[in-house]
Image (cartoon, rainbow, N blue to C red):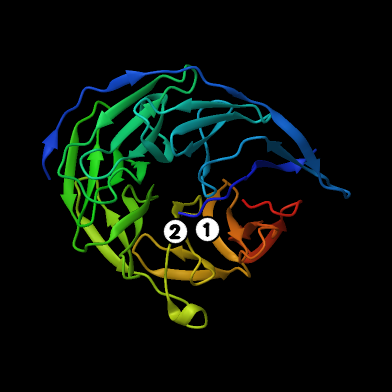
Amino acid sequence: MRTLASVFVVLSLLSSAACGTSNLPSVATRAAPVIAPVGDITEPGASPRRWIQLSYAPVDSFARIVTGYGKYVWMADHGSIVRFTYDGVGQSFPTPTGLNAYQITRGPLGRMWFSEYGGAGVSKLASIDPQTGLIREYALPGPGGENEGETVAAGPDGKLWFGAGPGRVGSMTPSGDVVYYPTPTQDLVLWLTPGPDGNVWTVNQTPDGKASIYRITPDGMVAVFGVTGNPLVNNGAACPIQIIDSADGHLYYTDPCAMWVAQLSTSGALIQTYSSPIAPYYLTANLHAHVFFTAIPPIHTRQERGALGDIDTLTGSVKLRTAPQDGMWM
């Protein structure tokens, strides 16, 4: 995990102007310090865009911001969950046990759900009430795998799914019932997403650099698909980072080793790829056939500017919007 000594969080407004067990959650809430916005940035031009900048320095410079319930977006930043309004005001909620929060997602019961990493047998899943900040933690029964508590997603079946590998994934009901399922490979799950076909999809890697994709049915049946690298970049290596579903009925994943975003069918077939001149990392999609990704240039002086990529999946065009200031990544 790469970190920076000082990183600003930037929100851009892209508009003009196998065993089962049950847990009782531990519940806690703490006072959340307010994070005030600082100098906003307005790009010049006929159709100016406003960038809202917050004076918040994350512990994890690769922390992901996700949409949530109501008028909030959320970020899991190691020992805290951070809630932002669209006006750029943030509040930080420390995790009750001090475990590192890694991923956060919108989930069942109107709550945001996140993973807390503490290692095998220590990690937890947790939820936070969007309005009150009340956090409920659910212990994951051991023995656990080395990446247990690093990944979580809300599945189409109403459960939370998480990586518990190598060699297995887990699901948990909103009340805390946990079931583990074996996987055919020893890959570690890096990211999960609910698919348009009613299954859960993952991207995975092994310590020696091999990559795969899982399709997991609600009853835990796992199909494995290989990941194709770009033969013209990095000796054909593949290192998928994130996978999402899209309104067009397909899946998309980023691969910074291959320098592209790939489109995947629900049968596991690679449909096409969208190249990026700088490495793509994290994804989101809208309801109008556009997929967006963050892109990070090679790091030399820490003065480089990151970019926001925009894929029009109907035309196949890819546009990059460069950050408005030096040293700003996304």
Tally the numbered discs. 2
Residue 18 percent across, percent down from the top left? 12, 45
Q: Residue 23 in the image: x percent, y percent?
A: 19, 26
User: Circle 2 sits on which residue?
Assistant: 241
Residue 232, relative to residue 116: is it above or below?
Answer: below
Q: Nearer the viewer, residue 15 or 79?
A: 79
The residue identified by callout 1 is 281
Say whether residue 138 is left or right of residue 14.
left
Which residue is located at x 31 percent, y 27 percent? 137
Label 1, secondary structure: give it.
strand
Q: Amino acid at mark 1?
A: Tyr
The image quarter containing residue 118 is: top left
Q: Residues within 10 Å of mark 2 (few under 14, many from 20)?
A: many
Query: If you read the primary sequence from the N terminus, does the residue marked by circle 1 or circle 2 appear first?
Result: 2
Q: Secondary structure at mark 2?
A: loop
Tell me how far mark 1 sits from mark 2, CA to CA. Answer: 6 Å
Does residue 113 appear to the left or right of 159 in the view shown? Answer: right
Check disc 1: other Cα within 10 Å, few if <14, some if 14-19, many if 20+. many
Along the line of sight, the residue nearer the viewer: 314 or 301: 301
In the image, is residue 235 above or below residue 180? below
Q: Nearer the viewer, residue 160 or 165?
A: 165
